[in-house]
Image (spheres, rainbow, N blue to C red):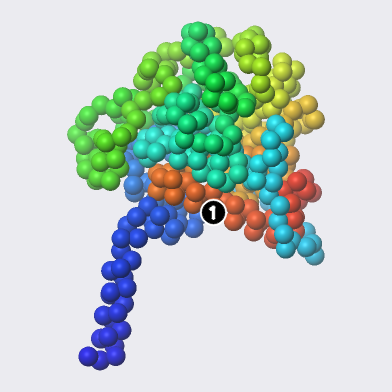
Amino acid sequence: MSDFARLVRDQLRADAQQLPDRWSAEGRVRRCGSIAELRACARRQVPRPAFDFADGAAMDEVTAQANLADLERLRILPRPLIDVEEIDLTTTVLGRRVEVPWLGAPTGLTGLQHVRGELAVAGACAAAGTLYIASTMSSYTIEEIRASCDGPLWFQLYVFRDRGLVADLLGRARDARCEALVLTVDTPRLGSRERDRRNGFTIPPRVTARSLVEGARRPVWTRAFLREGRLGPGNLAAGLEEFAMQIDPTLSWRDLAWVREQWDGPLVVKGVLHPDDARRAVELGAQAVVVSNHGGRQLDGAASTITALPGVLDAVGDGAEVYFDGGVRRGADVLKAVALGARAVLLGRALLYGLGAGGDAGVARALGILRGELELALALAGCPAVGRLDRSWLAG
């Protein structure tokens, strides 16, 4: 046998030994080097209706795209000749130290991306030294998430027409040792999500010719989902239509005051874009606000979150912490938001892409990618610690 033939044989054997690893979730996500690559991988793994439920936004998705584009346009102003051998990513949120300046955002029906759903995301956040915000609309119950995760949890709440249901959710959140309540205030009605309409997406799902084809094209997801998947929100005995009917369009500032009376722990108000609203939320007892447009999933044409962030920060001042939500795909995005003044950012879709690409391993990979990118961005910007960032690191 010639040396060339022997080389080819040995290479083929090596490739064959690596095939099982390449097919595994760990091997699949290991090859992804960015959140965009995890998104592309998730798109191949998850049936289109489920993927689009997480990836899509309202109507023409103008606001969702603006979240990305406006954040990308913001420019960093690096500072040279600064010792950046050691980079400190730590910060605090409501008095709790976290190892990275981000939190796991509340996302509904997370189990549609992978059967492990919120259990995987909460566990990965805890392992990364930060906390997870469990959604009212989570696939797993708050009790199941708590049982699977030793890390800190917050709970996100919608105020429903049935205040008894709300009170019950608050009691369950207390029993699950949730340290803070995140009240979402930007959903008096559900936004028009046209990808879901085009896909015929419903919860519980309807069996159609299209859904059968999508399931057949992704047998690994389908097999796992049929075996142990969650069809609806674990905390509620309802599908999406019933959830939409429970949303209270009369929600007002007096209801925020009512929630403040019902919850004796820290209160965070999520879904604020206008400075006056941020100021009033703090006056009514909120310890923090989240600048958010629901990922562009509610009012299409609303301001991007990065353009709304400075006004909210100026209005709130030192009266409360301000978190940023919307469009974070790179470590440099985190740098920009924190430099503007956000205490931390929320990660929603970025973690869902990792989840869809490879379950627990995929979420861990997403967090690892962002951590590495943020460390590099800080070093190249000449900032050795997240806590030292301010607007002087931004151009303009």
* Residue 119: x %, y % from top left: 45, 36
Q: Residue beneath label 1, please?
A: 369
- The 10 Å Cα crowd at callout 1, few under 14, some 14 to 19, many 20 or more, is some
The local secondary structure at tag 1 comes to helix
Residue appearing at x 51%, y 19% in the figure: 172
Left or right for 20, reference 362:
left
**Residue placed furthest toward the left:** 209
Residue appearing at x 47%, y 26% in the figure: 143
* Residue 35: x %, y % from top left: 50, 50
Which corner quadrant holds the N terminus?
A: bottom left
Residue appearing at x 36%, y 25% in the figure: 232
Q: In this view, does 370 lie above or below 13?
A: above
* Residue 366: x %, y % from top left: 50, 49
* Residue 344: x %, y % from top left: 66, 39
Asked whether the viewer can see residue 311, the reply is no
Left or right for 177, reference 277:
left
The three-letter amino acid code for the residue at tag 1 is Ile
Residue 248 or residue 92, whichever sits in front: 92
Q: Is residue 362 above or below residue 269?
A: below
Residue 174 or residue 138, whichever sits in front: 174
Asked whether the viewer can see residue 265, the reply is yes
**Residue placed furthest toward the bottom:** 2
